[in-house]
Image (cartoon, grey):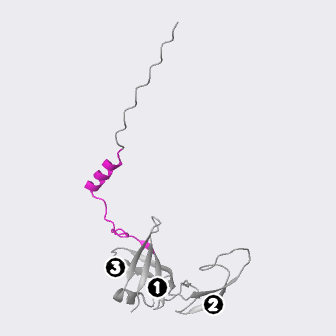
Amino acid sequence: MAEFKIVINDTKTGKSYQREAKDNLADFFMGKKVGEKVSGEKLELTGYEFEITGGSDKCGFPMRKDIKGATRAKILAVSGVGIKKTRAGMRKRKTVCGDTVDANIVQINMKAIKYGKAKLGGEEEPTEETKAEAKEEAKPKEEAKPKEEAKPKEEAK
């Protein structure tokens, strides 16, 4: 059985959240391609919609959208996923994975397109009581009273 780590990027806050995909959920992702849209109901996130943006295989090679299938390929790349340019006009031979999720893929990266009511991180929405408690904690504590200033000595005449 395949297992995946699913990394979900929240485009509103810039935070990422990680989930595990095992058994039936992992079977659901088999055969999906980079760029496909996935319903959030499979991940128990009602109302959400995600887009697969990439991933990596068991050896750490990144998935690229322009390589078709579930294979690895050595490409001569100018830019894109897996390439860091150090000078102008540089091309580099790199090993990358194809755009299809298969049993060799370990991590799947996704971004949120549509948002639901539940939060991605699993935190619940704050209630009135928790809001009041947070305000009380945020209030500054009473400061110590300032010491009385020393009176200037009277000048002797």
- The N terminus lies in quadrant: bottom left
- Between the C-alphas of marks 3 and 1, the distance is 21 Å
* In the displayed structure image, the side of residue 128 where residue 141 appears, left or right: right
Residue 75 on image: x %, y %: 64, 88
Mark 1–mark 2 distance (CA, rounded to whole Å): 20 Å
> At label 1, which amino acid type do we have?
Val
Residue 147's place in the image compared with 50, above or below, is above
Q: Is residue 57 left or right of residue 115?
A: right
Circles 3 and 2, Cβ within 8 Å, touching? The answer is: no
- Closest to the observer: 55 or 156? 156
Q: Earlier in the sequence, mark 3 or mark 1?
A: 3
Residue type, mark 2 in image: Lys
According to the picture, the residue beneath numbered tag 3 turns out to be 41
Q: Which residue is mark 2?
A: 74
Q: Which mark is residue 106?
A: 1
Give SS at disc 2: strand
Residue visible at 34% across and 88% down in the picture: 24
Q: Could you say which quadrant of the image residue 80 lies in?
A: bottom right
- When the figure is inspected, residue 135 is found, relative to residue 76, above or below; the finding is above
Give the CA distance from mark 3 to mark 2: 36 Å
